[in-house]
Image (tube, rainbow, N blue to C red):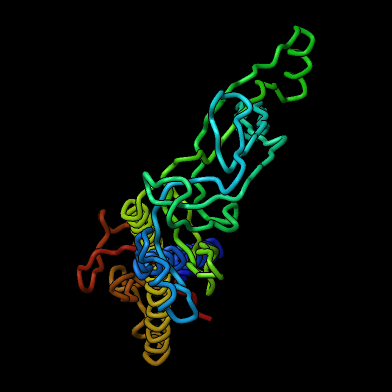
């Protein structure tokens, strides 16, 4: 039997790999879909005087998953930018990032490599208040644990790249070592006072303070500069992307599985046909075992796909091209040698 009819180890490994990738992609798609569904089910509330009454009437003075929009205002003190005058905020992130080129010994290319060598985040308590509200505001929502939010939108207020200065000796040593420093990028990001912010989380009334905090039951906590509609559309777009990716990978896995099963079916069918032919030849005896072309030599090969055993190898090689079966005139695609014991 031709070895091409058997499933190879590579095909099995490829099928297992594609199935595992499909399962991973499906898990990511389900996670993204769950986030989008929870955002759709979030209750949108307005930051006004009625908010306190709404929470008083809610069970446990709590809305488990709510959407609220407002502007940022510090509770007491603010953070001043280290590089930009008159820039104040409530969250400040300072980052030093190293940039260098690294030689890849496999691809033989220089690849860009980035590494954070230092990062510090400062934060002061802040509220969300209605746009254009007086000081102090009539209603405010205290934002708790903002650094744990999935999408904390920070504005880049300062960015500067400090290129590295190298001598000829340094350049030669870096070339030999396979690492060429490019420089250090210094960045300052801030959540500025007065910035518009959309909060998605658990809204509770604690004594006289309204608080926005991370929700329970695995729901996503968001603090984004985008509007809620834009945030929802972006999440739905991500869901569609992962759905298409999962579908394509799943179809590829199904196609590979069908190919392997069809290959196995052909292999079993050919084995069965060959066994039936051998049984027929054994039952017929020597009188029916002569080649139908030369009538002298014994039949020594099986023609596929028709399955006839009617010729010796010498007469088969003498058939005009493309070769056809002398019995049924069907095109011969493969020949399997026949061995009589």
Q: Is residue 85 above or below residue 122?
A: above
Depth check: 155 or 91 in front?
A: 91
Instruction: Give the image quarter of residue 179.
Output: top right
Instruction: Give the image quarter of residue 162.
Output: top right
Position in image of residue 269 (x %, y %): 38, 80
**Left or right placement of residue 99 versus residue 217 in this view:** right
Depth check: 252 or 335 in front?
A: 252
**Looking at the image, which residue is at 44% across and 57% down?**
139
Position in image of residue 103 (x %, y %): 67, 28
Q: Is residue 297 above or below residue 149?
A: below
Q: Tell me how many marks there are.
A: 0
Depth check: 341 or 43 in front?
A: 43
Depth check: 270 or 51 in front?
A: 51
Position in image of residue 144 (x %, y %): 58, 58
Instruction: Give the image quarter of residue 341.
Output: bottom right
Residue 123 seen in the current view: yes
- Residue at the bottom extreme of this rendering: 283
- Residue at the top extreme of this rendering: 168
Residue 253 seen in the current view: no
- Residue at the left extreme of this rendering: 329
**Looking at the image, which residue is at 51% across and 62% down?**
212
**Looking at the image, which residue is at 54% across and 55% down?**
149
């Amino acid at each position: 039997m031709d070895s091409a009819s058997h499933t190879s180890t590579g095909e099995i490994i490829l099928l297992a790999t594609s199935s595992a990738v499909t399962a991973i992609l499906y898990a990511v798609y389900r996670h993204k879909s769950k986030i989008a569904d929870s955002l759709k089910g979030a209750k949108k509330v307005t930051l006004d005087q009625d908010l306190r009454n709404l929470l008083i009437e809610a069970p446990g003075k709590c809305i488990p998953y709510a959407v609220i929009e407002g502007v940022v205002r510090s509770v007491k003190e603010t953070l001043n930018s280290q590089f930009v005058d008159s820039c104040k905020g409530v969250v400040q992130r300072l980052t030093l990032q190293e940039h260098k080129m690294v030689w890849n010994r496999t691809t033989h290319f220089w690849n860009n490599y980035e590494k954070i060598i230092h990062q510090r985040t400062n934060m002061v308590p802040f509220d969300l208040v209605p746009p254009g509200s007086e000081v102090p505001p009539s209603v405010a929502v205290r934002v708790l644990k903002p650094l744990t939010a999935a999408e904390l939108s920070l504005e880049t207020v300062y960015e500067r790249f400090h290129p590295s200065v190298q001598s000829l000796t340094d350049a030669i040593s870096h070339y030999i070592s396979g690492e060429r420093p490019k420089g250090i990028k210094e960045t300052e990001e801030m959540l500025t006072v007065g910035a518009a912010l959309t909060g998605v989380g658990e809204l509770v009334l604690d004594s006289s303070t309204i608080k926005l905090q991370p929700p329970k039951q695995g729901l996503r906590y968001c603090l984004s500069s985008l509007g809620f509609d834009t945030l929802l559309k972006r999440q739905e777009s991500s869901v569609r992307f992962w759905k298409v990716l999962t579908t394509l990978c799943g179809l590829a896995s199904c196609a590979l599985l069908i190919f392997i099963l069809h290959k196995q079916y052909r292999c079993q069918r050919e084995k069965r046909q060959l066994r039936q032919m051998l049984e027929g030849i054994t039952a017929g005896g020597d009188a029916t075992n002569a080649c139908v072309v030369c009538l002298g030599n014994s039949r020594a090969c099986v023609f596929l796909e028709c399955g006839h055993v009617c010729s010796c190898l010498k007469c088969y090689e003498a058939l005009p091209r493309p070769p056809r079966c002398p019995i049924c005139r069907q095109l011969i695609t493969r020949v399997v040698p026949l061995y009589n014991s």
